Image: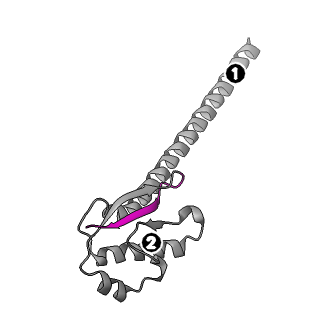
Amino acid sequence: MENASKALIITAEILIGVILISILVLAYYNLNSFADSINYNIQDKNINQFNSQFTVYEGKTNLTAHDILTIINLVNEHNLNNIDEIYQIKITGNTIKNIENIIDSEFIMDNQDKKYTVNKITFNDKTKLVKTINIIECR
C-alpha cells in the first residue's frame, strides 16, 4: 500500500512538472509573437513616415520650383545613403532633366514661374518604399 501511494505522489509530481513546462513553453511563444507584432508595427510606421515625405505632394497641381527642389533633394539624400539598387528612388517625367546635376539657385531662377504636379508615385513591392516619382509641368 505504501508503494502505491508513493507511486501516485511521484506520478502527480511528474504531471505537475509537465503542465508547468507546457505553460512556460506556451508563454514563451506568445511573448515571442507579441514582440514580432510590435517590431512589424514599428517597421510599418517607419515606412509610412518615410513615404509621407513624398506622398504629400501627389496630386497637387500647384507645386512650385521650391517644392520640386525639396523633392529632388530628399531623393538625392536618400539615394546617397542607400546605395543598394532596391532602395533607390527614381524621378521620372518629361520636364526635369539631369536631376543629379541640378543647382538649387539656377533651377529656381529658371523655373520660378512654372507650376508642377506629382501625378504618380509607385512603390517597391518588396520594401514598400517609394520607388518612382513622376513629376510633370502643368500647362
Q: Secondary structure at mark 1?
A: helix
Q: Quadrant of residue 47?
A: bottom left
Q: Quadrant of residue 66?
A: bottom left
Q: Position of residue 74 (x, y in %)?
A: 41, 73
The residue that label 1 is drawn on is 11
Q: Which residue shows up at 69% across the image and 18% down it?
A: 8
Residue 54 in view of the camera = yes
Q: Which residue shows up at 49% across the image and 53% down it?
A: 39
Residue 42 in view of the camera = no
Is residue 137 highlighted in magenta? Answer: yes
Determine which of the numbered discs, if any, sits on residue 75 in the image.
2
Q: Which residue shows up at 51% across the image and 72% down it?
A: 79
Is residue 101 highlighted in magenta? Answer: no
Q: Secondary structure at mark 2?
A: helix
Which residue ends up furthest to the front in the rendered image?
Answer: 139
Q: Up-down: is 23 above or below 74?
A: above
Which stretch is magenta? Answer: 126-139
Three-letter amino acid code of the residue under disc 2: Val
Q: Position of residue 40 (x, y in %)?
A: 48, 50
Q: Position of residue 112 (x, y in %)?
A: 26, 81
Which of 8/49 is in front?
A: 49
The quarter of the picture where the C terminus appears is: bottom left
Which of 13/15 is in front?
A: 15
Residue 38 is left or right of residue 117, and the answer is right
Among the two numbered marks 1 and 2 on one chain, the one whose residue lies closer to the N terminus: 1
C-alpha distance separating marks 1 and 2: 68 Å
